[in-house]
Image: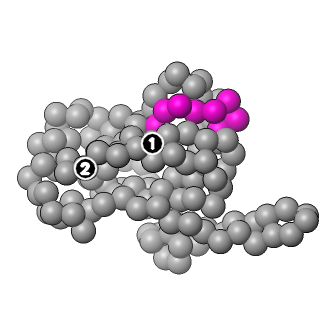
């Protein structure tokens, strides 16, 4: 099992004095087929969300309004990413344990997922996550 690394994608914004438009397309700037879309909003600044990884689901996170931070851990690296622009997309691989926090009052975090919801796909226990993903340390 290869440990894949999350990545930031910048999508182009089209616009003029009337405003801007950002386009997200399956297999174009989103590197997977989008099967589920949801968004997180009205989250208090001192609340942390997430606390899980997946067995197969890939996700794209976009802060379409406001900002938040995302803590990432794939057993071989830990990093913090700030999502503060609607044209900055964080691609999460299944092996990314992720926690979202430090939400601004106006934050709306859009999530595009490669799979439909399946509770069995979630790894919600950090020790189990380590057992599943620490077997491989090579990053792709």
Q: Where is residue 67 in the image (x, y as percent from the top left)?
A: 61, 41
Q: How far apart are marks 2 and 1 (CA)?
A: 14 Å
**Residue under label 1:** 70
Magenta residues, start to end: 100-107
Marking on residue 77: 2
Task: Name the residue at 33% across, 39% down.
Answer: 52
Classed neighbour count for the residue bearing mark 2: other residues with Cα under 10 Å, few (<14), some (14–19), many (≥20): few
- Report if residue 101 lies within the magenta region: yes
Q: Position of residue 94 (x, y in %)?
A: 31, 54
Q: Position of residue 98 (x, y in %)?
A: 37, 42
Quarter of the picture containing the N terminus is bottom left
Considering the numbered disc 1 on the image, is that residue within a helix, a strand or a loop? strand
Q: Is the magenta stretch mostly helix, strand or loop?
A: loop
Residue at the bottom extreme of this rendering: 28
Residue at the right extreme of this rendering: 18
Quarter of the picture containing the C terminus is bottom left
Task: Left or right? Give the position of 48 relative to 98.
Answer: right
Q: Position of residue 100 (x, y in %)?
A: 46, 37
């Amino acid at each position: 099992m290869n440990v894949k690394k999350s990545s930031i994608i910048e999508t182009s914004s089209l616009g003029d004095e009337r405003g801007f438009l950002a386009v997200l397309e399956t297999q174009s700037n989103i590197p997977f087929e989008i099967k589920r879309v949801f968004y997180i909003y009205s989250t208090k600044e001192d609340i942390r969300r997430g606390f899980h990884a997946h067995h197969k689901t890939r996700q794209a996170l976009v802060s379409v309004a406001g900002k938040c931070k995302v803590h990432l851990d794939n057993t071989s690296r830990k990093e913090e990413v700030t999502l503060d622009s609607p044209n900055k997309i964080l691609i999460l691989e299944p092996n990314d344990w992720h926690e979202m926090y430090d939400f601004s009052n106006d934050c709306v975090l859009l999530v595009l997922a490669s799979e439909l919801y399946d509770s069995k796909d979630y790894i919600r226990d950090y020790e189990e996550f380590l057992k599943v993903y620490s077997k491989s340390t090579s990053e792709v």
